[in-house]
Image (cartoon, rainbow, N blue to C red):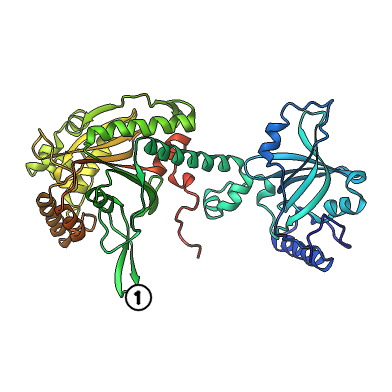
Amino acid sequence: MTDHPLKPVSGAQPPPAALPLEQLIAQRREKLNRLTQAGINPYPYHYDRTHTISDLLKEFQDLSHETPSQTQVSCAGRIMTMRDMGKSCFAHISDGPDRVQLYVKKDVVGEDAYRFFQKDMDLGDFIGVEGSMFRTKTQELTIRASKITLLSKALRPLPEKFHGLRDPETRFRMRELDLATNSSIQQLFRRRSRLIASLRQTLYDEGFLEVETPLLQAQAGGAAARPFETFHNALQTKLFMRIAPELYLKRLLVGGMERVFEIGRVFRNEGVDTKHNPEFTLMEAYQAYADYNDMMKLTELLIANAAETIQGGDSLLVHDRPLSLQRPFRRATLTDLFKQHAGHDVIAAWKDGRLRSVAQELHVGFDENTPDHKVFDRIFDAKVKMHLWDPTFVLDYPVEISPLAKMHRSEPGLVERFELYIAGDEIANAYSELNDPIDQRQRMEKQAALKKSGDEEVETADESFLTALEHGMPPAGGLGIGIDRLAMLLTGQTSIREVILFPLLKPEN
């Protein structure tokens, strides 16, 4: 079987638009059979393009209606629209976010090829087109086709008369169709890609080395979260999907790699909502001889550069409300924010054993099995978080919820930690990293005791990490940024599912 430009296949008829899906699929399969019987390969291996559609739109943007181009071009894409004019057809093809119009005329491509295009091609098919560029009377840049080659026969029609999916559940479950029919979704994920590239470039420019650490771990550490479990048959051992790369990255600091970062997936066995997906993308960076003050400067730089890349500046419109990312970002201690918005020094109340009574007074719900650290978080979420619209570094957390951070140099009972909030969402988390192996072991042992008492979302004692720390780790600052939430912010989305290509969904049936 050979690859051919389009030739007519006898008996082919365009399917009526109103036919049921099963009948449309059956008709396309019949066309496929006729193609193969006629010796035409409906799925050739290769096609030579001189231009992408984006290239054509740029190169010929100044082409006028009066002076058509004589240059021969070839491009390829999916048929998105077709309009039969009798002895000529207009169509649009897309190779991603870009579209270009085709003009297919019987006396140019030949009667056989024209009849094939008119009768046997379907919306959704991929074709290659050769021809020259001109601009129509309505000023639309168009390819005057001289040859058309079938590249892939689509056996199912695109959804909703080819104007795009609308139901969110269907869009996320069938992302390939969402991308094929909604050009704005293509653009969204291209912006996400540029965001990640910007973060990488900034870190490269700052002297960081990109590394990779294990996804499968004997112990899941580096964050307070419930892990996913799996089993390795050859080793006959239980393993965990990582909840954070932190402990391995710190071991690289022990080894003398002074500035390292990783961008990758992490997995947390938690609920699903507009801000959480059990599988998400995290960037973590660690810098020797730095502290959380240095990490604030790095965070501002990373986000400012990303905003410039994605938005062209530091001014955003989030949920129809203006937001400025102008540096420096606001700094506020957690203690002061609690006093301002909750009317209590909640950290002091926790130390004094009054945390639950304060929560009750503030009408924050919990039950007798709710751990104190979750009661603390719920008070923050209910009373403080919504007030953090402008970028705000929330500083200095209780040691009880920060087992990997260094003790504050001037505030007893607190650690040098910040969380960055923008538009009411946590975007980043950072520490002056704890490098005292004795203190670290004691804290991990306390966390292990909490785990035995039933709290599954606590840090576990990792002997490999503790042993590495005993060999000496330099003072360091560490930073984590949630890529998906930052992408939501910079692209104006309200759900994390919009910025993840294939978010986790409950299986159908």
**Residue that numbered label 1 is attached to:** 234
**Residue 327 in view in this figure:** yes
Residue at point 16%, 49% (across, down):
472
- Quadrant hosting residue 388: top left
In this picture, residue 397 sits left or right of residue 230: left
Residue at point 15%, 37% (across, down):
346
Element type where label 1 sits in the image: loop
Instruction: Give 394 or 296, whichever is nearer the viewer.
Output: 296
Q: What is the x, y in percent for residue 369?
A: 18, 56
Residue at point 48%, 36% (across, down):
491
Q: What is the x, y in percent for residue 250?
A: 24, 49
Within-10-Å neighbours for mark 1: few <14, some 14–19, many 20+ = few
Vertical comparison of 249 with 67: above or below: below
In this view, which residue lies farthest toward the front?
256
Total number of numbered discs in the rendering: 1
In this picture, residue 76 sits left or right of residue 504: right
Q: What is the x, y in percent for residue 398?
A: 15, 41
Going by the numbered disc 1, the residue's amino acid type is Ala
Image quarter of the N terminus: bottom right
**Residue 494 in view in this figure:** no
- Quadrant hosting residue 57: top right
